[in-house]
Image: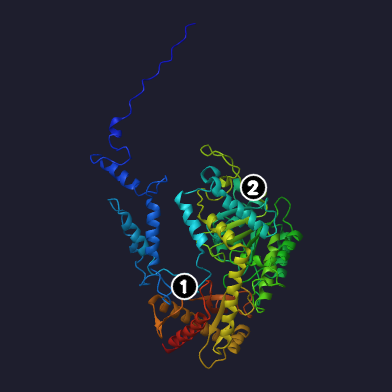
């Protein structure tokens, strides 16, 4: 048998035409085609991959952070950035725009980016107290920015490498904080509190309806939450295919806004008798306005007492703690020694909050927003789960042909997202490392001291009344009444007496008008006696009246002005000024 010679194709010479486009340093020749010149120009403005060369990124970041900082006002300036708070576009006409034909100038484009911040809220300004949106801490801001430089994709290990430690160590640190086994806990940084709620619901659907991942949701399983639960419940049930008709609301206590566990038991008894499965029960562990903390341990007891019918998995208990999670830092605080020196006024409140949040240890999963009461930038939300093996196995799909397992940690097999930025995980992780236990306790306790200072100030104004005196969160809610009315007595009537419903609605409209006037002043840069007015907001129904416990009357609810002094720059003088401006806005409204 004769060996057959293997004939190889001749090796082609390198395409000389392409080589002729470039100098040895990678820049384009003058006679190169236009595409090569564009390529060369862009390469010179991309971040440099090597040390020892000029890095345009480092230079530009310093330059444009300085230009952004120039939008900050002088001391005692308005609560917005820049000189003009007006909206710079009209809708929908703003969308009538095309991509430019020619390549833009880098500095020119970045100058336009800075201009977009003209009129944006300045979250660090002590006049800003509209919502639970604080100034981010420096460690978290820089960590989040650094994630973009080399674009780590934390979907899987090959593209994240050691950056994955941020998510893994978050699971461990928070697992320890909640009293879980840190080795068994898991964490997924996701797109916000809505993402956490959606994961909590999906966990329940997957566990309770075993075939739902392949056959779809074909059973009307229920998701149960309180009347105070966040409106994202509708988004999550809609997008998960369950449908909002399967949301079941539990009544809340008229004073505490907590879930009524007696009503929950009635619901579970009924579902058990009818063999209706419950996918997820959501306990709200701190709401934005009402600061409600549900009795999660009692809810866990009811889940154990009323299991799902045979053939369905066990109900998931999800703690929506995106607002209230950080109170758990006080579960281990030494209140007898009081090393941080908090006042006697707030010590019992800090202790009660810590004890309430400590019960989250019984949850299957917890939602956490670092960008709320974690002082980190958007978006840094974390879905934390107690049993990583169960959650990740339940949601796991098989391997993919174009991705290989290179490290032990690969969330690509069970996360909803298939592209995952590290900006949130690095921001949250850096916050945990930077604040430590005492730093978080200090900033939380300090803001609570401010909240109760404001509460005491409100009591010195007979025309103002605090409407959430028993809430233990960071917000102060109050109503302003016309001069001459005893605000406390009038509010009590409107809250408890159905005969005062017309007066309630009248003063709700006044509250809304005051809130809108304050916003108008803030946006106009109004000054009173040479001082800028605060950026505040209002709630259009943070609680029902006592004659509308079931919420069937949409107008028998309590409106309130909101003061959320969330940043470290707030002073007693600012709090006094805020109340002065509220009264001034009331007088302006009543004159009209």
Q: Position of residue 417 (x, y in %)?
A: 53, 50
Q: Is residue 447 left or right of residue 97?
A: right
Q: Is residue 408 left or right of residue 534?
A: right
Dots 1, 2 in contact, CB < 8 A: no
Residue furthest toward the right? 305
Give the answer, above or below, for where 410 lies relative to 548.
above
Q: Position of residue 216 (x, y in %)?
A: 59, 49
Residue located beneath label 2 in the image: 394
Give the answer, above or below, for where 82 lies relative to 460.
above
Residue furthest toward the front? 52
Residue name at image x 51 percent, y 50 percent: 420
Give the answer, above or below, for where 258 lies relative to 109.
below
Q: Quadrant of residue 199?
A: bottom right
| Residue nearer the viewer, 118 or 300 | 118
| Residue nearer the viewer, 507 or 138 | 138
Q: Secondary structure at mark 1?
A: loop
CA gap, disc 1 to disc 2? 46 Å
Residue name at image x 38 percent, y 50 percent: 55
Residue 220 visible in rendering: no
Q: Secondary structure at mark 2?
A: helix
Which of the image's four quarters has the C terminus? Answer: bottom left
Q: Quadrant of residue 487?
A: bottom right
Q: Is residue 144 left or right of residue 34?
A: right
Q: Which mark is residue 125?
A: 1
Circle 1 or circle 2, nearest the eye:
1
Q: Position of residue 170 (x, y in %)?
A: 60, 55
Residue furthest toward the left? 31
Q: Position of residue 434 (x, y in %)?
A: 57, 61
Q: Quadrant of residue 69?
A: bottom left
Q: Few, some or many C-alpha atoms within 10 Å of disc 2 (few <14, some 14-19, many ≥20)?
A: some
Residue 52 visible in rendering: yes
């Amino acid at each position: 048998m004769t060996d057959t010679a293997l004939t190889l194709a001749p090796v082609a010479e390198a395409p000389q035409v392409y080589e002729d486009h470039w100098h040895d340093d990678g820049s384009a020749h003058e006679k190169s085609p236009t595409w090569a010149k564009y390529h060369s120009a862009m390469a010179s403005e991309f971040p440099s991959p090597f040390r020892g060369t000029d890095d345009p990124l480092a230079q530009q970041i310093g330059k444009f952070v300085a230009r952004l900082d120039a939008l900050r006002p002088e001391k005692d300036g308005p609560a917005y950035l820049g000189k003009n708070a007006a909206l710079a576009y009209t809708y929908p006409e703003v969308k009538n725009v095309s991509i430019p034909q020619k390549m833009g100038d880098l500095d020119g484009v970045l100058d336009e980016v800075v201009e977009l911040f003209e009129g944006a809220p300045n979250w660090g300004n002590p006049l800003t107290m509209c919502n639970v949106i604080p100034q981010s801490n420096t460690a978290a801001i820089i960590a989040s920015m650094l994630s973009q430089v080399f674009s780590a994709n934390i979907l899987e290990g090959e593209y994240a490498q050691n950056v994955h430690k941020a998510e893994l160590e978050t699971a461990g640190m928070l697992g320890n904080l909640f009293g879980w086994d840190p080795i068994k806990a898991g964490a997924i940084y996701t797109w916000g509190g809505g993402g956490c709620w959606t994961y909590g619901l999906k966990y329940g659907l997957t566990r309770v309806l075993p075939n739902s991942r392949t056959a779809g949701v074909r059973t009307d399983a229920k998701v149960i939450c309180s009347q105070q639960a966040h409106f994202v419940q509708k988004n999550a049930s809609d997008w998960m295919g369950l449908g909002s008709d399967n949301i079941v609301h539990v009544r809340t206590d008229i004073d505490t806004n907590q879930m009524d566990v007696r009503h929950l038991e009635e619901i579970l008894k009924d579902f058990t008798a009818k063999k209706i499965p419950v996918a997820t029960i959501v306990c709200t562990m701190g709401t934005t306005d009402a600061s409600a903390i549900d009795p999660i341990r009692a809810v866990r007891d009811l889940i154990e007492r009323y299991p799902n019918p045979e053939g369905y998995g066990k109900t998931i208990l999800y703690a929506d703690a995106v607002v209230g999670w950080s109170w758990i830092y006080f579960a281990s605080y030494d209140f007898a020694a009081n090393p941080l020196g908090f006042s006697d006024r707030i010590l019992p409140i800090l202790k009660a909050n810590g004890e309430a949040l400590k019960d989250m240890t019984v949850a299957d999963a917890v939602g956490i927003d670092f960008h709320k009461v974690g002082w980190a930038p958007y978006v840094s939300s974390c879905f934390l789960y107690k049993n990583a093996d169960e959650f990740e196995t339940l949601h796991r799909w098989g391997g993919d042909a174009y991705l290989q397992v290179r490290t032990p940690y690969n969330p690509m097999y069970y996360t909803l997202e298939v592209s995952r930025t590290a900006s949130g995980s690095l921001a949250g992780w850096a916050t945990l490392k930077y604040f430590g236990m005492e730093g978080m306790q200090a900033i939380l306790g300090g803001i609570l001291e401010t909240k109760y200072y404001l509460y005491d100030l409100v009591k010195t104004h007979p025309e103002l009344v605090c409407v959430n005196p028993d809430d233990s969160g960071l917000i102060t809610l109050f109503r302003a009444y016309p001069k001459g009315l005893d605000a406390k007595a009038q509010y009590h009537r409107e809250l408890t007496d159905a005969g005062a419903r017309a007066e309630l609605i009248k003063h709700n409209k006044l509250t809304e008008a005051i809130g809108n006037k304050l916003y108008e002043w803030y946006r106009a840069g109004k000054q009173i006696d040479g001082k800028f007015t605060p950026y505040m907001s209002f709630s259009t129904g943070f609680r029902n009246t006592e004659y509308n416990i079931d919420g069937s009357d949409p107008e028998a609810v309590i409106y309130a002005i909101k003061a959320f002094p969330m940043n470290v720059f707030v002073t007693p003088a600012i709090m006094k000024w805020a109340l002065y401006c509220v009264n001034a806005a009331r007088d302006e409204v009543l004159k009209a």
